[in-house]
Amino acid sequence: MTTAVPLDDAQFYADDPDPALADLRRRCPVYYHPAGNFWVLTRHADLQEVSKDPARFCSGQGVLLADRARAIAAADSILYLDPPIHGRYRKLVSRAFTPRTVATLEPRIRQLTVELLDQLDPTVPVDAVDALSAPLPLFVIAEMLGVPASDREAFRRWSDAIMEAATDLNDANAALAAELLLYFDERLQARVDHPGDDLLSALVTATVDGERLTRDEQLGFCMTLLVAGNETTRSLITGGLIALAQHPEQRAQVVADPGLLPQAVEELLRWVTPIMAMARTATGDTAVGGEPIAQGDYVVLSYAAANRDEEAFGPDAARFDITRSPNPHLAFGFGEHYCLGAGLARVEARVLFDELLRRWPFFQLAGEPTRVPSTLLRQVAHLPILFDPSRGEHPSPSVGPSHSPS
Ligand code: HEM
């Protein structure tokens, strides 16, 4: 089958890929993309099948579209580890992300949120990415890593550069990434001399099979936590602001009944799907959905497409519905590599929308979101928002939906 869907073109994703992905899912759910030499799976059931079988579809040879152009080192990230070693490494940091630990962080997350909201002028258009969605996840993960508040701004620059390098490596972002590695290296060394109770201390004291982690492995963990926890949650919050502003009737429901917030966050996760795709490699000749897949073939899992699959979400899968239940979305992946920070991201989004909607339940988009081309992340660089239109003197702009019905 031929198709004009440019599945490896970053601009395609910035221009709202959902209708084309839905079409692909209906016409050819297990699709071989000759131009990129990879398969793309778009059905919810197929993504689950592949994700829960790392012996058949491994992560060790790459998980991003961009990974195929570079060498992967296992120390880079637990994202690239396969069983049985993957589980042993995951356990090293999983204690920091248990529901219990995350619950203890909630008051601090609320405090940080309130401080950010206090700094906003709600009567003029504000870039919500800069003011809210970027700083909150960054401050939270920085504190978990034991990074002082004075280093937060440098942290933000580094984190942005690393995310950019994941899809478009260049000299400038490589230099910033090197700066961050150096920073972590110094701080890890400081924990060797004076261990505390933060995540960095856990990394320098941890052992796997009796062996301490190498410094490269420790650095890989730091980078993974920083990047995985930052841009993704930023994307969820930004996308959530857009979706709620564009669906005022649904927003009014949550305002009237804040008990709906956890469900609303699940629907925002499904609707936004911050990480649009991850990939696996077939470890032997196999088949998915009746299509033969050869050993070594690269298989892209389109979470964005699977999260609108009518077979999983019913005939109204293309509708934003904050009361949707059940909501088995795959925004956090599935199986072995299921997102370690899912609980943390959920709390950050719930607390932020709780505090925001209580203050300014009628916030409006004040211009078009500036979308960033990326094959990985649903990303917005700038989002002008007028938080309290009743006090501003700004006419209501007409901003179209970010995702047309598929
Ligand atoms: C809305 C926010 C988030 C989204 C959408 C998201 C999405 C994902 C997805 C799809 C995966 C699976 C990757 C794969 O299967 O190859 C993943 C893994 C991971 N995420 Fe998240 N994530 C979010 C927030 C976070 C946060 C806040 C953290 C930590 C601070 C985090 C840490 C991780 C880690 C460490 C992994 C790797 C787990 C493993 O390989 O076992 N994520 N995430």
Image: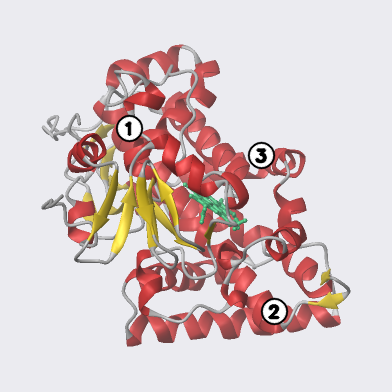
Residue at 41% of width from left, 26% of height from top? 312
Sequence-first tag of 3 and 2: 3
The residue carrying pointer 1 sits among few (fewer than 14), some (14 to 19) or many (20 or more) residues within 10 Å by Cα, namely many
The span from disc 1 to disc 2 (Cα, nearest Å) is 43 Å
As displayed, is residue 31 above or below residue 283? above
Task: Give me the disc on residue 106.
Answer: 3
Question: Would residue 276 be seen by someone viewing this image from the given angle?
Answer: no
Left of 172 or right of it: where is 48? right
Amino acid type, residue under disc 3 in the picture: Glu
Q: Nearer the viewer, residue 343 or 241?
A: 343
Q: Which residue is mark 2?
A: 187
As displayed, is residue 60 above or below residue 27? below
* Label 3 beta carbon within 8 A of ligand 1: no
The span from disc 1 to disc 3 (Cα, nearest Å) is 31 Å
Labels 1 and 3 touching (C-beta < 8 A):
no
The span from disc 3 to disc 2 (Cα, nearest Å) is 26 Å
Left of 335 or right of it: where is 43? left
* Nearer the camera: disc 1 or disc 3: 1
> Quarter of the image holding residue 208?
bottom right
> Quarter of the image holding residue 222?
bottom right
As displayed, is residue 348 above or below residue 180? above
Residue 119 in the image, given as x and y percentages of width and height: 44, 47
The residue carrying pointer 3 sits among few (fewer than 14), some (14 to 19) or many (20 or more) residues within 10 Å by Cα, namely some
Amino acid type, residue under disc 2 in the picture: Arg
Residue at 47% of width from left, 39% of height from top? 330
Sequence-first tag of 1 and 3: 3
Sequence-first tag of 1 and 2: 2
Q: Which residue is mark 1?
A: 308
> Quarter of the image holding residue 386?
top left
Residue 227 in the image, given as x and y percentages of width and height: 50, 63
Q: Where does the C terminus fall, quadrant-wise?
A: top left
